[in-house]
Amino acid sequence: MNHIVFDHVSKIFPHRGGNFTALKDVNLTIGEREFVAIVGPSGCGKTTLLRIVAGLEAPSAGDVRVGGRPVAGPGPDRAMVFQQFALFPWKTVRENIAFGLKCKNMSWRERNRVVQRYLDLLGMTGTEENYPHQLSGGMQQRVAIARSYAIDPDVLLMDEPFGALDAQTRTVMQEELIRISRVHPRTVLFVTHSVEEAVYLADRVVVLARNPGHVAEIIEVRAVRHAEKWEGQASEDVIQKPSFVHMRAQIWKVLRPQIEQRPVDAS
């Protein structure tokens, strides 16, 4: 079943008295519980594509459907995780995770049960009463991910969620995301600048080109991951596999000409 469908989607922004086409005629389908990563050069419309699915931007042409329904704005069936954590600094870990549940009018007892489940799942038990400034970057992002999973969305939208982390913490968080995805599978659309991260995490990798943003190539990863059982192996072992190296090179072959072009300034 196709869970997310982009049907001839274009997005045009006003720009210096004229128009800037961020996306043009994007057609893409994402299956239920499929993990799809989007990579591409700066200015190719990766985040814009994510914001359209989230209902934070409306397409200029075409439409996006989630679960067969047109996206007309934000909804509880979709949750977004940002690069900069976006936690409430005046709320504790427990209160941050419970925020969306409170908005759903869930009882206090049920909220605590759900919050504790994700505290345990993400290895955060004992941090419940800490505030964000008392946590490392990796722990803050765990809270943000827990908050998104806790509201039980059908779709998880992740905009470079590990981009602000150091290399070691980023690797740990990638492995954690794979582990969580096995326990609580969701349809995931994951934007990243890292080709290695995309190949390591995703079932498919969508490469966007720019000027204007469009789908340049789609690389299938899932069959290789399952055949070689990547999920049960450390990332440092996976990235050395010939199949991993081949797919990474395939993506870079598409990306490099795009990166070497001068981007259009849409600011």
Image (cartoon, rainbow, N blue to C red):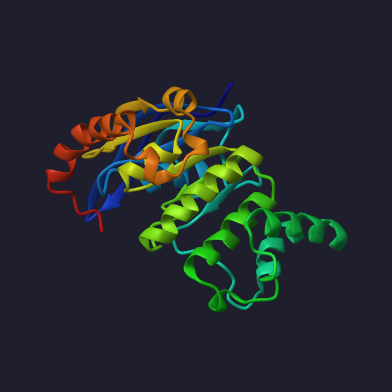
Q: What residue sits 22% from the left and 56% below the top?
A: 16
Q: Residue at x 70, y 57 (%)?
A: 120
Observer-nearest of 44 and 219? 219
Q: Position of residue 174 (x, y in %)?
A: 47, 49
Residue 209: image location, x then y, percent: 25, 36
- Write the residue at 52% across / 39% down: 188
Relative to 81, residue 224 above or below: above
Q: Can residue 70 be seen in the rendering of this structure?
A: yes
Q: Is residue 17 left or right of residue 89?
A: left
On the picture, is 197 further left or further right than 104?
A: left
Residue 45 in view of the camera? no
**Residue at position x 65%, y 66% in the image:** 96
* Number of dots carrying numbers: 0
Q: Quadrant of residue 252?
A: top left
Tell me if 134 is positioned left or right of 76 in this view: left
Q: Is residue 120 above or below residue 45?
A: below
Closer to us: 38 or 169? 169
Quarter of the image for residue 84 reads bottom left
> Left or right of 208: which side holds 28?
right
Residues 77 and 150: in front is 150
